[in-house]
Amino acid sequence: MKSIEKLIRTIPDYPKPGIMFRDITTLLSDAKGFKKAIKAMAERFEDQKISAVAGIEARGFILGGAIADRLECGFIPIRKKGKLPWKTIGQEYALEYGVDVIEMHEDAVAKDQRILIVDDLIATGGTAEAAVKLIRRSGGKVAGATFIIDLPELGGAKKLSDLGVDSHALVAFEGH
Ligand code: AMP
């Protein structure tokens, strides 16, 4: 996946000192790179009877919509608190300082549906773990989670594996 790695722009010290921000907009704007990334993320789950992709706001929407189209399944938005118009269920997750909440419509997932979680990057895994909990609380099954980027030193993929979730990323970067 060398070409995908090269298409990701790294911005040091954004949004704050010490963070290496992995910017996928340079990958998204490259027609071949974008297509290749979507194909690789979807391929692994093609035979897994996915009922719907759950995309995490906001970059998970761009990737998740395209992956859902490839897998010929539905799309479910997981959003920051207060953004969804219908009745929601929410799940807290830890930030470096304090907590945040993500929400999903309470009727978005039906019992035993097989859901694939999609986001651009997994770092500590806090956001993805909250998404797993929302889906399971709704009676759904988490069929897997797919990301473009993994930051293995932050332990997110391990966290998902401990939760029994099969996670997959196209590239891995060292550090934060
Ligand atoms: P976490 O919950 O720690 O796994 O963080 C994952 C979420 O934060 C994803 O939605 C990412 O888009 C974003 N994120 C965390 N770290 C970075 C980073 N170094 N570069 C870009 N996005 C990041």
Image (cartoon, grey):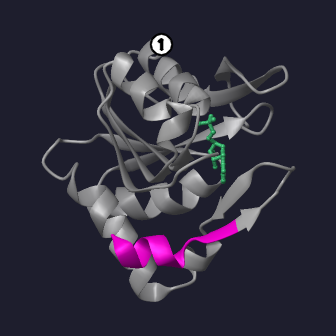
Percent across and percent down for residue 168 are 33, 45
Where is 104 relative to 138, above or below?
A: below
Q: Foreground residue, 173 or 148?
A: 173
User: Of helix, strand and loop, which mostly describes the magenta segment?
Assistant: helix
Drawn side of residue 33 relative to residue 85, left or right = left
Residue 98, by quadrant, is: top right
Residue occupied by mark 1? 137
Where is 47 relative to 132, above or below?
A: below
Amino acid beneath label 1: Arg
Percent across and percent down for residue 173 are 51, 54
Please state the extent of the stretch shown in magenta in the rendering.
1-10
Q: Quadrant of ligand 1?
A: top right
Drawn side of residue 55 relative to residue 112, left or right = right
Looking at the rendered image, the quarter that the C terminus falls into is top right
Residue positioned most to the left: 47
Q: Foreground residue, 110 or 163?
A: 163
Residue at 67% of width from left, 20% of height from top? 90
Residue positioned most to the bottom: 31
The question of residue 145 being in magenta is answered with no
Percent across and percent down for residue 64 are 46, 55
Q: Foreground residue, 163 or 3?
A: 3
Mark 1, residues whose alpha carbon is within 10 Å: few (<14), some, or many (≥20)?
some
Is residue 44 shown to the viewer in this render?
yes
The question of residue 7 being in magenta is answered with yes
Residue at 87% of width from left, 50% of height from top? 16
Residue at 66% of width from left, 24% of height from top? 88
Looking at the rendered image, the quarter that the N terminus falls into is bottom left
Is residue 71 shown to the viewer in this render?
no
Percent across and percent down for residue 100 are 77, 25
Beta carbon at label 1 within 8 Å of ligand 1:
no
Q: Foreground residue, 43 or 6?
A: 6
